[in-house]
Structure formats: structure tokens, C-alpha cells
Amino acid sequence: MYAFAPDPALSKPELYRELDQAAQALVAGEPDGVANMANIAALIGQFVDRLNWAGFYRVVDGELVLGPFQGKAACIRIPFGQGVCGTAAASGATQLVPDVDAFPGHIACDAASRSELVVPVLRDGTIIAVIDLDSPEPARFDADDAAGIELLAKTIAAAI
């Protein structure tokens, strides 16, 4: 059993370094990508506060397909270029969205979501998944959150 206990007194950069170290420990030696994504989604839920959804969309046959997550049931398939996740996948760039209602073409899987952070996961320069975080708070995510999840995406790319 794993017992990770993030310290709420840590700065965001320190918290994300701890999250990254915990992720490294969980995926070390585990070859199953789905199991690794499930544990990473659980870790994100444990380390990152004020979320209502955290998880993965995997690239399958040229579209995003729902992967392991924490939160309410979600959209199953998202075409590249559509919504925040599809935009991240098509562009290869992190999407930091303070107000999802202002994002053109936003796909509302959970009407309670107000802000979103989506980070592409690349392996050998190819997008294999995105990490998607949703919050019921407007402007919940900032540059520190983006940098932390980008670090996590690099760490786990080979393990998912």
C-alpha cells in the first residue's frame, strides 16, 4: 500500500515536485499504462485541491478517448481540435483556461466546471494522451499549476 501525504504548507512548485516524486515511485517497474494512469489520476486528486475532475484522455485512432480519471462520468470521445482537450491535442500546447464558458467550442462534460488545465503528454515527440484538470472555481489554475502538470506529463510519458 502506498501512503502519500502532501503537506498543505508547501508552495505550489514544491507540492508539484512531491507529486512528481510520488508518480515516479508509483510507475517504477509497472508496465501497464492503464494502471499507471489510474494511480496518477488518484495522486492528482490527492495532491491538487479544488478539483472536480482529474484524469486522462488517450490518443486512439486519431481522437481522444476517455482514460482513467477521478470525478463524474465524462465525455468518452473528443475529436482533435474540439474543446479544451482537443485543442491541446491538436496544438501540442498546454491550455490554461480561466473561464471555460469563454473558450470557443468548450465541451461541458460537467456543468459545474468553471476553469480547466489540459497538458499534452508526449512520447518521442508524439502526443499519446492529455492530462485534464477541471475545477468548479473560475481561474483556479495558474502558471505554477501548468508547470507542475507539465513536469508530471514528462515524468510519466514512458509509463503510460
Image (cartoon, grey):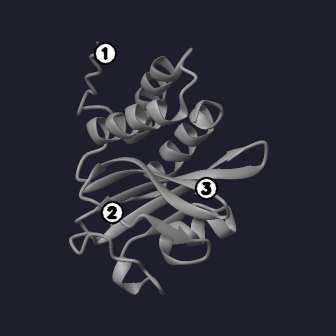
Q: CA distance from mark 3 to mark 2?
A: 16 Å
Q: CA distance from mark 3 to mark 1?
A: 29 Å
**Looking at the image, which residue is at 53% across and 19% down?**
30
Residue to which mark 2 is pinned: 74
First of labels 2, 1 by sequence position? 1
Amino acid type assigned to the residue bearing label 2 in the image = Ala
Local packing at callout 3 (Cα closer than 10 Å; few below 14, some 14-19, many 20+) is: many
Q: Position of residue 104 (x, y in %)?
A: 48, 87
**Looking at the image, which residue is at 34% across and 68% down?**
115
Q: Secondary structure at mark 2?
A: loop
Q: Secondary structure at mark 3?
A: strand
First of labels 3, 2 by sequence position? 3
Q: CA distance from mark 2 to mark 1?
A: 27 Å
Location of residue 81 with respect to 74 vertically, above or below: below
> Are dots 2 and 1 in contact, CB under 8 Å?
no
Disc number lying in front (2 or 1): 2
Residue 29 occupies quadrant: top right
> Are dots 3 and 1 in contact, CB under 8 Å?
no
Residue to which mark 1 is pinned: 2
First of labels 3, 1 by sequence position? 1
Local packing at callout 1 (Cα closer than 10 Å; few below 14, some 14-19, many 20+) is: few
Amino acid type assigned to the residue bearing label 1 in the image = Tyr
Location of residue 8 with respect to 97 vertically, above or below: above
Residue to which mark 3 is pinned: 59
**Looking at the image, which residue is at 40% across and 77% down?**
107
Location of residue 109 with respect to 38 vertically, above or below: below
Q: Secondary structure at mark 1?
A: loop
